[in-house]
Amino acid sequence: MPGPTIDSVQPDASTPGPLFAIGGAEAKLRRRTVLRSFLEAAGGEQARIAVIPSASALGDEVVDVYRAVFTSLGAAEVINVRPESRAEAHDQKLVDALDSATGVFMTGGNQLKLSSHITGTPVGAAIEAAHLRGAVVGGTSAGASILAEHMIAFGGSGSTPKQRMSQLAVGLGLVRGVVIDQHFQQRNRYGRLMSIVAQSPALLGLGVDEDTAAVITADQRLRVVGRGSVVLIDGSQVVSNSHSAHRTAPLLFSGAQLHLLPAGAEFDLNSRQLIQVVTELPPGEAEEVAAAEADLRQLAREIAAEGVSPSHYARRVRRRTKSS
Protein backbone atom coordinates (compact mmCIF):
# COMPACT_ATOMS: atom_id res chain seq x y z
CA MET A 1 0.00 0.00 0.00
CA PRO A 2 1.54 3.37 -1.00
CA GLY A 3 2.73 5.73 1.70
CA PRO A 4 1.71 9.36 2.04
CA THR A 5 2.32 11.74 -0.85
CA ILE A 6 3.42 15.30 -0.37
CA ASP A 7 -0.13 16.62 -0.65
CA SER A 8 -1.99 13.80 1.07
CA VAL A 9 -0.98 14.26 4.69
CA GLN A 10 -4.07 15.30 6.66
CA PRO A 11 -4.62 15.40 10.43
CA ASP A 12 -6.54 12.41 11.78
CA ALA A 13 -8.35 11.90 15.06
CA SER A 14 -5.05 11.40 16.91
CA THR A 15 -3.38 14.09 18.97
CA PRO A 16 -0.12 15.20 17.33
CA GLY A 17 2.95 13.97 19.16
CA PRO A 18 5.42 16.19 21.00
CA LEU A 19 8.31 17.88 19.24
CA PHE A 20 11.84 17.82 20.70
CA ALA A 21 14.11 20.67 19.57
CA ILE A 22 17.50 19.73 21.04
CA GLY A 23 20.32 22.27 21.06
CA GLY A 24 23.05 19.77 20.15
CA ALA A 25 25.78 17.95 22.09
CA GLU A 26 23.20 16.09 24.20
CA ALA A 27 24.70 13.74 26.81
CA LYS A 28 24.99 10.17 25.52
CA LEU A 29 27.01 8.46 28.24
CA ARG A 30 25.93 9.43 31.75
CA ARG A 31 22.78 11.27 32.78
CA ARG A 32 21.29 11.34 29.24
CA THR A 33 18.34 13.38 30.51
CA VAL A 34 17.30 14.70 27.09
CA LEU A 35 17.54 11.42 25.18
CA ARG A 36 15.83 9.56 28.03
CA SER A 37 12.93 12.04 27.89
CA PHE A 38 12.70 11.57 24.12
CA LEU A 39 12.57 7.79 24.47
CA GLU A 40 9.92 7.93 27.21
CA ALA A 41 7.76 10.15 24.99
CA ALA A 42 8.20 7.60 22.17
CA GLY A 43 6.89 4.71 24.26
CA GLY A 44 9.79 3.56 26.42
CA GLU A 45 10.31 -0.18 26.08
CA GLN A 46 7.81 -0.29 23.19
CA ALA A 47 9.56 2.51 21.30
CA ARG A 48 10.53 2.04 17.66
CA ILE A 49 12.91 4.89 16.81
CA ALA A 50 13.69 5.90 13.23
CA VAL A 51 17.01 7.79 13.11
CA ILE A 52 17.45 10.12 10.12
CA PRO A 53 21.16 11.02 9.80
CA SER A 54 20.97 12.77 6.41
CA ALA A 55 22.52 16.00 7.74
CA SER A 56 25.62 14.23 9.03
CA ALA A 57 28.82 13.78 7.06
CA LEU A 58 29.55 10.65 9.06
CA GLY A 59 28.62 7.19 7.89
CA ASP A 60 26.57 4.52 9.62
CA GLU A 61 28.54 5.07 12.83
CA VAL A 62 26.34 8.04 13.75
CA VAL A 63 23.29 5.77 13.68
CA ASP A 64 25.24 3.13 15.62
CA VAL A 65 25.82 5.67 18.40
CA TYR A 66 22.12 6.51 18.73
CA ARG A 67 21.16 2.85 18.40
CA ALA A 68 23.47 2.02 21.31
CA VAL A 69 22.09 4.87 23.44
CA PHE A 70 18.39 4.26 22.79
CA THR A 71 18.77 0.49 23.11
CA SER A 72 20.60 0.81 26.41
CA LEU A 73 17.74 3.03 27.63
CA GLY A 74 15.25 0.31 26.71
CA ALA A 75 14.04 1.00 23.15
CA ALA A 76 12.59 -2.02 21.36
CA GLU A 77 14.07 -1.12 17.96
CA VAL A 78 16.22 1.55 16.31
CA ILE A 79 16.29 1.75 12.50
CA ASN A 80 18.29 3.77 9.97
CA VAL A 81 16.32 5.96 7.54
CA ARG A 82 18.90 7.81 5.48
CA PRO A 83 17.94 9.44 2.19
CA GLU A 84 21.13 10.83 0.61
CA SER A 85 19.32 12.81 -2.09
CA ARG A 86 15.86 14.02 -3.05
CA ALA A 87 15.55 11.00 -5.33
CA GLU A 88 16.20 8.64 -2.42
CA ALA A 89 13.66 10.56 -0.32
CA HIS A 90 11.05 9.19 -2.75
CA ASP A 91 12.04 5.59 -1.91
CA GLN A 92 8.90 3.77 -0.74
CA LYS A 93 10.96 1.55 1.59
CA LEU A 94 12.11 4.59 3.55
CA VAL A 95 8.57 5.95 3.69
CA ASP A 96 7.24 2.58 4.88
CA ALA A 97 9.93 2.45 7.59
CA LEU A 98 8.55 5.69 9.06
CA ASP A 99 4.94 4.50 9.01
CA SER A 100 5.34 2.34 12.12
CA ALA A 101 7.84 4.51 14.01
CA THR A 102 6.82 5.79 17.43
CA GLY A 103 9.71 8.25 17.37
CA VAL A 104 11.59 10.06 14.59
CA PHE A 105 15.01 11.47 15.49
CA MET A 106 17.06 13.66 13.11
CA THR A 107 20.76 14.01 13.84
CA GLY A 108 22.95 17.08 13.59
CA GLY A 109 25.15 18.13 10.71
CA ASN A 110 24.56 20.42 7.75
CA GLN A 111 21.04 21.82 8.01
CA LEU A 112 20.93 22.90 4.36
CA LYS A 113 21.73 19.33 3.38
CA LEU A 114 18.91 18.08 5.58
CA SER A 115 16.49 20.64 4.13
CA SER A 116 17.43 20.02 0.51
CA HIS A 117 17.11 16.23 0.88
CA ILE A 118 13.87 15.98 2.87
CA THR A 119 11.52 18.97 2.70
CA GLY A 120 8.81 18.61 0.08
CA THR A 121 9.44 14.88 -0.45
CA PRO A 122 7.50 11.74 0.53
CA VAL A 123 9.95 11.16 3.39
CA GLY A 124 9.23 14.68 4.66
CA ALA A 125 5.50 13.97 4.32
CA ALA A 126 5.93 10.70 6.24
CA ILE A 127 7.65 12.57 9.08
CA GLU A 128 4.70 14.96 9.24
CA ALA A 129 2.26 12.03 9.12
CA ALA A 130 4.09 10.37 12.02
CA HIS A 131 3.83 13.59 14.03
CA LEU A 132 0.11 13.96 13.29
CA ARG A 133 -0.69 10.40 14.39
CA GLY A 134 1.05 10.93 17.74
CA ALA A 135 4.67 9.91 17.25
CA VAL A 136 7.34 12.05 18.89
CA VAL A 137 9.47 13.89 16.32
CA GLY A 138 12.68 15.61 17.25
CA GLY A 139 16.20 16.40 16.30
CA THR A 140 19.47 17.72 17.57
CA SER A 141 21.29 20.77 16.18
CA ALA A 142 20.36 20.82 12.46
CA GLY A 143 17.62 18.31 13.26
CA ALA A 144 16.11 20.84 15.67
CA SER A 145 16.18 23.79 13.26
CA ILE A 146 14.28 21.92 10.53
CA LEU A 147 11.26 21.36 12.79
CA ALA A 148 10.16 24.94 12.18
CA GLU A 149 8.49 26.33 9.08
CA HIS A 150 11.37 28.79 8.62
CA MET A 151 14.81 27.28 9.27
CA ILE A 152 18.12 29.06 9.85
CA ALA A 153 20.32 27.82 7.01
CA PHE A 154 23.53 29.47 8.20
CA GLY A 155 24.81 32.65 9.79
CA GLY A 156 27.47 34.31 11.86
CA SER A 157 27.96 34.41 15.61
CA GLY A 158 28.11 37.36 17.99
CA SER A 159 25.83 39.21 20.37
CA THR A 160 25.05 42.19 18.10
CA PRO A 161 22.35 41.77 15.44
CA LYS A 162 23.55 42.82 11.99
CA GLN A 163 22.05 43.08 8.55
CA ARG A 164 22.59 39.94 6.41
CA MET A 165 23.79 38.05 9.49
CA SER A 166 21.80 34.93 8.67
CA GLN A 167 19.81 33.25 5.95
CA LEU A 168 16.58 31.28 6.13
CA ALA A 169 15.48 28.15 4.30
CA VAL A 170 12.26 26.13 4.32
CA GLY A 171 11.83 23.64 7.17
CA LEU A 172 9.30 20.90 7.82
CA GLY A 173 6.76 23.31 9.32
CA LEU A 174 5.84 21.09 12.28
CA VAL A 175 5.94 24.12 14.57
CA ARG A 176 4.73 27.40 13.09
CA GLY A 177 5.41 31.00 13.99
CA VAL A 178 8.79 30.08 15.50
CA VAL A 179 12.37 30.06 14.24
CA ILE A 180 14.77 27.74 16.08
CA ASP A 181 18.50 28.18 16.67
CA GLN A 182 20.80 25.74 18.46
CA HIS A 183 24.17 25.57 20.28
CA PHE A 184 22.80 28.91 21.38
CA GLN A 185 24.82 30.12 24.36
CA GLN A 186 27.86 28.00 23.50
CA ARG A 187 28.28 29.61 20.06
CA ASN A 188 26.93 33.06 20.99
CA ARG A 189 24.06 33.12 18.51
CA TYR A 190 22.05 35.90 20.15
CA GLY A 191 22.82 38.36 17.36
CA ARG A 192 21.71 36.21 14.47
CA LEU A 193 18.45 35.22 16.16
CA MET A 194 17.72 38.87 16.96
CA SER A 195 18.48 39.82 13.35
CA ILE A 196 15.85 37.34 12.11
CA VAL A 197 13.26 38.62 14.59
CA ALA A 198 14.10 42.19 13.58
CA GLN A 199 13.40 41.34 9.94
CA SER A 200 10.35 39.13 10.71
CA PRO A 201 8.79 40.31 14.00
CA ALA A 202 5.89 37.86 13.65
CA LEU A 203 8.33 35.01 14.28
CA LEU A 204 9.16 34.04 17.85
CA GLY A 205 12.90 33.46 18.15
CA LEU A 206 13.80 30.30 20.05
CA GLY A 207 17.41 29.54 21.00
CA VAL A 208 18.30 26.22 22.63
CA ASP A 209 21.49 25.51 24.57
CA GLU A 210 23.48 22.31 24.21
CA ASP A 211 22.29 19.22 26.12
CA THR A 212 18.90 20.92 26.39
CA ALA A 213 15.54 20.37 24.70
CA ALA A 214 12.56 22.60 24.05
CA VAL A 215 9.66 20.14 24.17
CA ILE A 216 6.59 21.46 22.35
CA THR A 217 3.22 19.75 22.81
CA ALA A 218 0.11 19.81 20.61
CA ASP A 219 -1.44 22.62 22.67
CA GLN A 220 1.63 24.79 21.98
CA ARG A 221 3.08 24.54 25.45
CA LEU A 222 6.86 24.55 25.59
CA ARG A 223 8.69 22.77 28.41
CA VAL A 224 12.46 22.92 29.00
CA VAL A 225 14.38 19.69 29.69
CA GLY A 226 18.11 19.25 30.22
CA ARG A 227 21.19 20.97 31.53
CA GLY A 228 20.98 24.43 29.93
CA SER A 229 18.36 27.02 29.04
CA VAL A 230 16.04 28.07 26.26
CA VAL A 231 15.93 31.70 25.17
CA LEU A 232 12.79 33.17 23.62
CA ILE A 233 12.84 36.52 21.79
CA ASP A 234 9.40 38.05 21.28
CA GLY A 235 9.52 40.86 18.71
CA SER A 236 5.81 41.64 18.70
CA GLN A 237 6.53 45.24 19.75
CA VAL A 238 10.04 45.57 18.34
CA VAL A 239 11.31 48.74 16.70
CA SER A 240 13.96 48.06 14.08
CA ASN A 241 15.68 49.65 11.09
CA SER A 242 16.11 46.32 9.30
CA HIS A 243 14.22 47.68 6.26
CA SER A 244 16.80 50.43 5.70
CA ALA A 245 20.10 49.18 7.20
CA HIS A 246 22.86 48.63 4.65
CA ARG A 247 25.06 45.60 4.08
CA THR A 248 26.35 44.27 7.40
CA ALA A 249 25.52 47.31 9.55
CA PRO A 250 24.44 46.78 13.19
CA LEU A 251 20.66 46.77 13.53
CA LEU A 252 18.43 48.89 15.73
CA PHE A 253 16.61 46.38 17.95
CA SER A 254 14.44 47.95 20.65
CA GLY A 255 11.34 46.94 22.57
CA ALA A 256 11.61 43.16 22.19
CA GLN A 257 10.81 40.93 25.15
CA LEU A 258 13.34 38.30 26.18
CA HIS A 259 12.59 35.16 28.19
CA LEU A 260 15.34 32.91 29.53
CA LEU A 261 13.89 29.59 30.67
CA PRO A 262 15.80 26.97 32.71
CA ALA A 263 14.88 23.30 33.02
CA GLY A 264 11.37 22.84 34.37
CA ALA A 265 10.01 26.11 32.97
CA GLU A 266 6.87 26.04 30.82
CA PHE A 267 5.83 28.65 28.28
CA ASP A 268 2.66 29.19 26.19
CA LEU A 269 3.71 29.80 22.59
CA ASN A 270 0.25 31.07 21.63
CA SER A 271 -0.06 33.76 24.30
CA ARG A 272 3.73 34.14 24.54
CA GLN A 273 3.57 34.05 28.33
CA LEU A 274 5.34 32.11 31.06
CA ILE A 275 3.12 29.41 32.55
CA GLN A 276 5.14 28.08 35.48
CA VAL A 277 8.57 27.09 36.68
CA VAL A 278 9.16 23.74 38.36
CA THR A 279 12.67 23.46 39.73
CA GLU A 280 14.30 20.17 38.80
CA LEU A 281 16.86 18.90 41.29
CA PRO A 282 19.81 16.61 40.54
CA PRO A 283 19.32 13.04 41.90
CA GLY A 284 21.65 13.56 44.89
CA GLU A 285 19.95 16.77 45.92
CA ALA A 286 16.53 15.18 45.48
CA GLU A 287 17.49 12.47 47.98
CA GLU A 288 18.70 15.08 50.47
CA VAL A 289 15.45 17.03 50.12
CA ALA A 290 13.43 13.84 50.66
CA ALA A 291 15.42 13.07 53.80
CA ALA A 292 14.94 16.63 55.07
CA GLU A 293 11.19 16.39 54.43
CA ALA A 294 11.06 13.14 56.43
CA ASP A 295 12.84 14.86 59.33
CA LEU A 296 10.37 17.75 59.18
CA ARG A 297 7.41 15.38 59.21
CA GLN A 298 8.87 13.63 62.28
CA LEU A 299 9.42 16.98 63.98
CA ALA A 300 5.81 17.93 63.22
CA ARG A 301 4.63 14.74 64.91
CA GLU A 302 6.78 15.51 67.93
CA ILE A 303 5.32 19.02 68.17
CA ALA A 304 1.79 17.71 67.83
CA ALA A 305 2.46 15.16 70.55
CA GLU A 306 3.39 17.85 73.07
CA GLY A 307 -0.29 18.48 73.72
CA VAL A 308 -1.07 14.92 74.90
CA SER A 309 -0.61 13.44 78.37
CA PRO A 310 2.99 12.54 79.42
CA SER A 311 2.15 8.84 79.78
CA HIS A 312 0.61 8.67 76.30
CA TYR A 313 3.58 10.49 74.79
CA ALA A 314 6.01 8.13 76.59
CA ARG A 315 4.22 5.09 75.14
CA ARG A 316 4.52 6.56 71.61
CA VAL A 317 8.24 7.16 72.05
CA ARG A 318 8.79 3.57 73.29
CA ARG A 319 6.89 2.13 70.31
CA ARG A 320 8.91 4.22 67.87
CA THR A 321 12.19 3.21 69.56
CA LYS A 322 11.33 -0.50 69.36
CA SER A 323 10.33 -0.27 65.70
CA SER A 324 13.59 1.41 64.74
Image (cartoon, grey):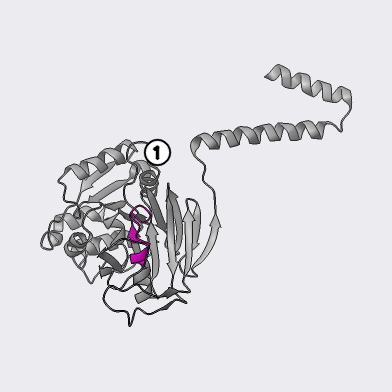
Placement of the C terminus among the 4 image quadrants: top right
> Eyeballing the image, is 198 above or below 304?
below
Q: Label 1 sits on what residue type? A: Arg
Q: Quadrant of residue 150?
A: bottom left
Q: Residue at x 16, y 44 (%)?
A: 60
The residue most toward the right is: 309
The residue most toward the front is: 249
- Residue 188 is one of the magenta-drawn residues: yes
Placement of the N terminus among the 4 image quadrants: bottom left
**Residue 21, image x, y percentages:** 35, 56
Q: Is residue 290 left or right of residue 140?
A: right
Label 1 Cα crowd, 10 Å radius (few <14 / some 14-19 / many 20+): some
Span of residues in magenta: 181-193
> Where is mark 1, residue-wise?
31
**Residue 294, image x, y percentages:** 65, 33
- SS at badge 1: loop
**Residue 92, image x, y percentages:** 14, 58
Q: Residue at x 23, y 63 (%)?
A: 124
Q: Nearer the viewer, residue 1 or 193?
A: 193
- Residue 313 is one of the magenta-drawn residues: no
Q: Is residue 89 visible?
A: yes
> Eyeballing the image, is 201 above or below 95?
below
**Residue 160, image x, y percentages:** 37, 66
Q: Is residue 88 left or right of residue 257?
A: left
